[in-house]
Amino acid sequence: MPTALPADLAAPLGTSPYPLAPSNPGPADGFAPSLAALQLISAELIPIRDKVLRGERLTYEDGQLLFATPDLNGTGALANYLTETRNGNRTTFTYNRHLNYTNVCQYKCMFCAFRRDGDEDDAVVMSPEFVREKLRTEFTDTMKEVHVVGGIHPSLPYEYYLELLRTIKSERPNLHVKGFTMIELDEIARLAGKPIEEVLLELREAGLDSCPGGGAEVLSPRVHKKLYNGKLPPERWLETTRKVHAAGYKTNATMLFGHIESTDERLDHLVQLRALQDETGGFMQFIPLVFHPDNTPLQRLGKTTGTDSLRTIAVSRLMLDDFPHVKAYWIMTGIKIAQIALHFGADDIDGTVVEEHITHDAGATTPQGLTTSQMAALIHEAGRVPVLRDTLYQELEVVG
C-alpha cells in the first residue's frame, strides 16, 4: 500500500531538502524528481524517508538500517530522489586521461595488484621526456583533465614531481592537473624536507590544480593494520586532506569496499568524511571504489556483488548530505552497474579515462577507456541527460 508523504516538509516537494553547492543546478527544463517510489518503500524506511524529505541529517543508526534492510529498491529510491533534487536529470562526465607515472612502490598493500618492486620487466618510471612525448602524441587540445597518480617510489627526488607537473603544463597548458593522493603528498613533503603547506604552494606553482581522493581505502584502524599497515594511517589521511583543503585545493574522497571491511566500518568512514566536509567544504565528489581481488593476496575473497555496489552508492549519497556529487566509477563497477547506479544516487560517471592500469591489473574486464560519444550514449541509455564537465564543474556542456 502506498504511504502518504509527510505534510510538514521543510521544502516543497521536488526542491532540494539540503543546501545546493554551486555545482548542483537543481531540476531544470520541466524535469520533476521521482516521487512515486517514495510512497512504496518498506515501513522500516519511512522514518528515514521523512528525515530526507525534511532535510534532516541521517544518523549512524539510520545508516546501519540502510545497509541492513532488504528493501534495496527503497534505499535506491531515496538516494535517487535526493540526487534528482540536486542535479535534475543530468549525469556528468569528463574528457580525461590517466597518467600513472610509476608503478614502483615501497608499500605492499594486500589489495594492490598494480605495485612493482622496481626490477620487473613491467616496472615503470616515466621520465619527463617520455611524459612530454606522450602528451604530444596521445593527448588532445580539447581534453579537460589528466589524472596523475603513482606508487610511492623509494628513491625519486622531490624535484621529479615538480618537473612532472611543469612538463604537463608546458605541453598542455589548458589541461587541468588532478594529481597526487594524500599518501603521495605526504611522501613528497617528506622528500622535500619542508612543511606540507609550503610544498603545496610549490606544487601549485609547478602546475597542480586539484587532488584525487584515493589512498583513504577504509578509514578503519583494524583494516589498516591488516591490509596496509605502514601506509598513511586514517588520522593522518584526514589531517593531510584538511591541510590540502586549507591550501585552497579541491579534492575528491574515496572508499575502497568489498574486501574485509564491515558495513559499520563503511559507515565510520562516511561519517568521518562528512565531518571533515562540514569543516572544510573542500570535497567535490565521493567515489565508492569496488575492490577487485584478482592478482592480489586477497584473491580468495572473490568479488562483491552488483547489489552491494548499488546499496553502497545509495547509502553514500544519503549519508553524505554535504557532498555535492557521488560518482559511479564505471571502470570499477562495470558499465551496466554504473548505468543502474544513476538511479541509485550517483550523478557522475567519471570520464573517458583512455588508459587505466591500477584496476585492470587487478582483473577489471571493463574497457581501458571510452570515447565521449560512447560515454554520452551509455548515459542516454540509462535515461539521463549527458553533460560534459571540467574537473571543478565550472564548464558544463550538454552532449547530444
Image (cartoon, grey):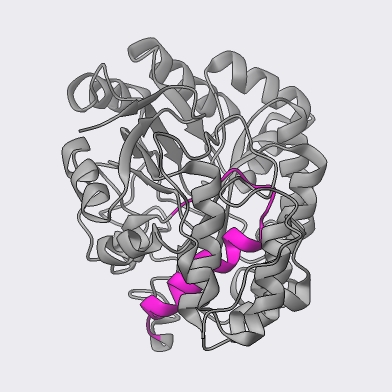
Q: How many marks?
A: 0
Q: Is residue 49 visible?
A: yes
Residue 224 visible in the current orientation? no
Q: Quadrant of residue 317?
A: bottom right
Query: Where is residue 135 drawn, in percent x and y?
Result: 27, 23
Indicate the quadrant where residue 329 lies: bottom left
Q: Residue 367 vs residue 149: left or right?
A: left
Q: Nearer the viewer, residue 226 or 18?
A: 18
Q: Is residue 27 magenta?
A: no
Q: Which residue is drawn at the image coordinates 52% and 89% (left, top)?
A: 70
At 39% from the left and 34% from the top, the residue drawn is 29
Image coordinates of residue 257 in percent, x first then y, are 52, 71
* Residues drawn in magenta: 302-327
Horizontal side, residue 329 vs residue 218: left or right? left
Residue nearer the viewer, 174 or 306? 306
Q: Position of residue 127 (x, y in %)?
A: 36, 29
Q: Is residue 306 left or right of residue 156?
A: left
Give the image location of residue 288, x and y in percent.
51, 61
Identify the residue at horizontal 71%, vertical 55% (top origin): 273
Residue 308 falls inside the magenta stretch: yes
Rendered image quadrant of residue 359: bottom left
